[in-house]
Image (cartoon, helix red, strand yellow):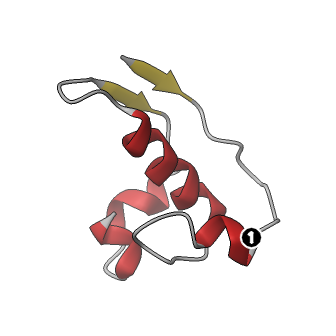
């Protein structure tokens, strides 16, 4: 089980970090979400506190 709160307000978005994950998207918050999902065990559970904008996106962010 993973419980987390991403680092809100972080401005750094390096290309190196983006290249580690399947979705090459710019908000560093979504890189954090991808890292958390990649870290889960096969039947693991995850709880993440997210900004509300993440829930209402229709761009590539919505598919993470």
Q: Position of residue 64 (x, y in %)?
A: 34, 63
Q: Is residue 38 visible?
A: yes
Give the side of residue 41 with respect to residue 22, left or right.
left
Q: Position of residue 42 (x, y in %)?
A: 21, 30
Give the side of residue 19 with respect to residue 47, left or right.
right
Q: Secondary structure at mark 1?
A: loop
Q: Nearer the viewer, residue 26 or 50?
A: 26
For label 1, the crowd category at 10 Å Cα-Cα, with few meaning under 14, some 14 to 19 and many 20 or more, is some
From what the image shows, is residue 28 above or below residue 14? above
Q: Is residue 27 visible?
A: no
- Residue under the image location 52 percent in, 59 percent down: 30
- Residue under the image location 60 percent in, 71 percent down: 18
Q: Nearer the viewer, residue 60 or 21?
A: 21
- Residue under the image location 38 percent in, 43 percent down: 37
Q: Position of residue 35 (x, y in %)?
A: 50, 47
From what the image shows, is residue 17 above or below residue 49? below
Question: Label 1: which residue?
Answer: 13
Residue 1: image quadrant is top left
Residue 55: image quadrant is bottom left
Give the side of residue 1 with respect to residue 49, left or right.
left
Q: How many marks?
A: 1
Give the side of residue 6 with respect to residue 12, left or right.
left
Residue 48: image quadrant is top left
Q: Residue furthest left?
A: 43
């Amino acid at each position: 089980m993973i419980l987390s709160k991403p680092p809100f307000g972080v401005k750094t978005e390096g290309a190196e970090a983006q290249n580690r994950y399947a979705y090459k998207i710019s908000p560093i918050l979504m890189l954090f979400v991808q890292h958390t999902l990649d870290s889960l065990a096969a039947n693991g559970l995850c709880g993440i506190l997210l900004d509300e904008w993440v829930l209402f996106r229709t761009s590539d962010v919505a598919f993470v």
